[in-house]
């Protein structure tokens, strides 16, 4: 997927238009609209940073062509990270220990 395909996916998932993305992210509407009119000729780094921060993704994800599968995986990782951040430190430790135990059991089955 190229940059615009990823942007369309993320905007659609969030129910955003070009205008609402502009307002929410602080990126001028003319910039967002220009990506579509000019087929996204080189977004500036500071603009990409704003998008990555707004959507909770990495710069690499935005600029590297990747598959839809990678996009969905990134979304799943983001969701899990948000859930993890909401846990107390004690519950985070329990979760890490559980993950270690599950991975050890999985490795033993191979």
Image: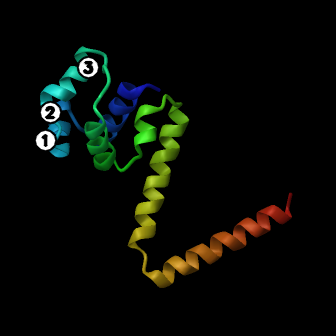
- Asked if residue 106 lies left or right of residue 31, the reply is right
Image position, residue 19 (x, y; %): 14, 33
Residue found 40% across the figure and 36% down from its top: 62
Q: Residues within 10 Å of mark 1 (few under 14, many from 20)?
A: few
Marks 2/3: CA–CA distance:
13 Å
Figure check: 109 above or below 6: below
Name the residue tied to disc 2: 19
Q: Secondary structure at mark 1?
A: helix
Marks 3/1: CA–CA distance:
17 Å
Q: Secondary structure at mark 2?
A: helix
Residue found 23% across the figure and 15% down from its top: 37
Q: Residues within 10 Å of mark 2 (few under 14, many from 20)?
A: some
Name the residue tied to disc 3: 36
Marks 2/1: CA–CA distance:
6 Å
- Asked if residue 33 lies left or right of residue 81, the reply is left
Of the pair 88 and 48, the residue shown nearer to us = 48
Residue found 45% across the figure and 61% down from its top: 81
**Colour mapping used in the image:** rainbow
Direction front: furthest residue? 45
Q: Which one is earlier in the sequence, the residue at label 2 or at label 3?
A: 2
Q: Secondary structure at mark 3?
A: helix
Figure check: 32 above or below 49: above
- Asked if residue 110 lies left or right of residue 68, the reply is right
Numbered label attached to residue 23: 1
Q: Residues within 10 Å of mark 3 (few under 14, many from 20)?
A: few
Badge 2 vs badge 1, beta-carbon distance below 8 Å:
yes
Image position, residue 24 (x, y; %): 17, 45
């Amino acid at each position: 997927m190229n940059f615009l395909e990823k942007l369309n996916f993320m905007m659609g998932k969030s129910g955003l238009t070009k205008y609402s993305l502009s307002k929410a992210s602080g990126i001028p509407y003319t910039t967002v609209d220009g990506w579509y009119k000019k087929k996204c000729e080189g977004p500036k780094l500071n603009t990409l940073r704003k998008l990555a921060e707004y959507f909770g993704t990495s710069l690499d994800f935005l600029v590297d062509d990747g598959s839809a599968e990678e996009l969905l995986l990134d979304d799943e990782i983001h969701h899990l990270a948000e859930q993890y951040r909401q846990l107390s430190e004690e519950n985070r430790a329990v979760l890490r220990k559980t993950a270690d135990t599950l991975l050890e059991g999985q490795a033993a089955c191979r």
